[in-house]
């Protein structure tokens, strides 16, 4: 059976990949999230908190997520030697670090070609 349905054109469609690291979940946003202006990761995170928090709750809270769900938004690097930036989110807000999120993001970034590994 096939469902041929397209969301209305004014809806935001956000694409994700769900992974886990030793059972710890992380939802990686791969497309559709609005741009995050700012020169630093903290600027970008502040913008997300103040303007786009409804998207965090839609992605992380039930029914699409759960209390233990973490998420991450890959961004362009904010330093000249960076490969990518990341903003971590969870059910209560935002984090500056998430160990299992880093492992999940690095794996997905490598496997999908978001970043190219040398060597």
Image (cartoon, rainbow, N blue to C red):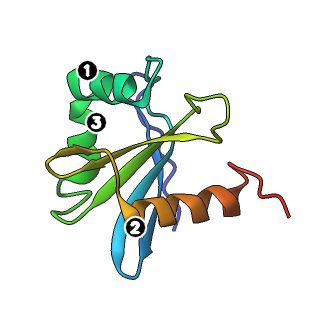
Q: Position of residue 39 (x, y in %)?
A: 47, 18
| Quadrant assignment for the C terminus | bottom right
Q: Residue at x 26, y 62 (%)?
A: 69
Question: Between marks 2 and 1, how big is the CA–CA gap?
Answer: 26 Å
Q: Quadrant of residue 62?
A: bottom left
Q: Which disc number belongs to residue 90?
A: none
Q: Earlier in the sequence, mark 3 or mark 2?
A: 3
Q: Which disc number belongs to residue 55?
A: 3
Helix, strand or loop at mark 2: helix
- Residue ranking furthest to the right: 119
Structural crowding at the residue carrying mark 2, measured as other residues with C-alpha within 10 Å and reported as few (<14), some (14–19) or many (≥20)? some
Q: Are marks 3 and 2 in contact (CB under 8 Å)?
A: no
Q: Position of residue 12 (x, y in %)?
A: 39, 30
Q: Are marks 2 and 1 in contact (CB under 8 Å)?
A: no
Between marks 3 and 2 in the image, the one whose residue lies nearer the viewer = 2
Question: Between marks 3 and 2, how big is the CA–CA gap?
Answer: 22 Å
Q: Position of residue 64 (x, y in %)?
A: 26, 57
Report the front residue among 99 and 89.
Answer: 99
Helix, strand or loop at mark 3: helix
Q: Which disc number belongs to residue 51?
A: 1
Question: Between marks 1 and 3, how big is the CA–CA gap?
Answer: 9 Å
Report the front residue among 64 and 74.
Answer: 74
Q: Which disc number belongs to residue 100?
A: 2
Q: Quadrant of residue 94?
A: top left
Between marks 2 and 1 in the image, the one whose residue lies nearer the viewer = 2
Q: Residue at x 73, y 53 (%)?
A: 113
Structural crowding at the residue carrying mark 1, measured as other residues with C-alpha within 10 Å and reported as few (<14), some (14–19) or many (≥20)? few
Q: Residue at x 21, y 33 (%)?
A: 54
Task: Please determine whether, in this image, residue 99 is positioned above or below residue 81.
Answer: below
Q: Residue at x 43, y 75 (%)?
A: 21
């Amino acid at each position: 059976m096939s469902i041929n349905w397209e969301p209305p054109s004014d809806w935001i469609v956000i694409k994700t990949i769900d992974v886990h690291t030793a059972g710890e979940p992380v939802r990686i946003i791969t497309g559709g999230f609005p741009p995050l202006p700012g020169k630093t990761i903290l600027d970008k995170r502040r913008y997300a908190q103040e303007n786009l928090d409804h998207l965090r709750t839609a992605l992380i809270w039930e029914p699409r997520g759960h209390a233990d769900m973490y998420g991450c938004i890959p961004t362009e690097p904010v330093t000249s030697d960076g490969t990518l930036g990341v903003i971590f989110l969870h059910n209560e807000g935002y984090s500056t670090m998430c160990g299992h999120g880093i492992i999940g993001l690095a794996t997905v970034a490598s496997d999908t070609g978001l970043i190219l590994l040398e060597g």
